[in-house]
Amino acid sequence: MRERGLEPDVITYNATISACEKGGQWEKALELIGQMRERGLEPNVITYSATISACEKGGQWKKALELFGQMRERGLEPDIITYNSTISACEKGGQWEKALELFGQMQERGLEPDVITYNATISACEPAGRVEEARALFLEAYRSDCYPKILSIRGALDLHDLSAPAARTVVRVALDDLLLAMERAGRAASRFFDRRSSLFTKTSTKNFIVSDIRRIPGGSSSVSARSAPG
């Protein structure tokens, strides 16, 4: 195009950088954004988002953060695509603290995290051993309907849309909740039998009633209230 005397504009550069991003050519993407500045063209949010995404795919988390900082310095406000790409770059670089910082920053700016944001941030925290942070993020995502199909109609977990760390977090949360429910049921049953035992020792067998047995978790509802035979 330049051989024909045509000068690329911002739209042309954006399309070319996006092609480099899809082709895993992060170095070429950086070269093009630098070329834009040299020619007096101002990169926009789309330009930066595509270049950051190229760096993320190339495992260049430092470059991604550098570009993110540059766009803020130039007065450009990142959108959710920019944040997602930058958080994903931090996740791949093992930078869980920076990922959480960016996650909080986007919420402060009024941007709603989507499933990509949550997956990337959880994936940054879980492998780093930040289990509580990952758990809190999953619960927040679930309550905000970012993972609406995670629990099927039959009660089975559907983890197809989740990253591996996010899926592990979901399973951990489900198991923790199951164990907690079992523990609570056990304590309830224990309190019931302790109360019945105390009652039995204080009263005669003749006056002992069994109607409350239907209140035991999982107890039979077929037992009716009656007095023991005299």
Image: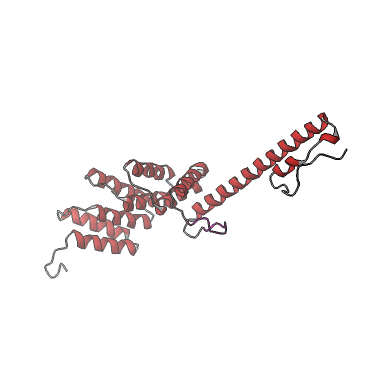
Q: Where 128 falls versus 167 (above or below)? A: above
Magenta stretch, main secondary structure, is loop
* Residue at x-position 77% and y-position 35%: 196
Residue 21 percent coordinates (x, y) = 32, 61
* Quadrant position of residue 33: bottom left
Of 111 and 184, the residue lying toward us: 184
106 magenta-colored: no
In this picture, residue 192 sits left or right of residue 84: right
Instruction: Tell me which residue sits at (43%, 50%) in the image.
Output: 118
- Quick one: quadrant of the N terminus? bottom left
Left or right: 79 in relation to 158: left
Asked if residue 157 is among those painted magenta in the image, a careful observer would answer yes
Locate residue 114, reporting x and y percent.
39, 52
The residue sitting at the right extreme is: 230
Please determine whether, in this image, residue 144 is positioned above or below residue 32.
above
Q: Position of residue 109 (x, y in %)?
A: 31, 42
* Outermost top residue: 202
Magenta residues?
149-158
Which corner quadrant holds the C terminus?
Answer: top right
The single residue placed furthest to the left in the displayed view is 5
Is 139 left, or right, of 209 in this rendering? Answer: left
Q: Position of residue 74 (x, y in %)?
A: 21, 45
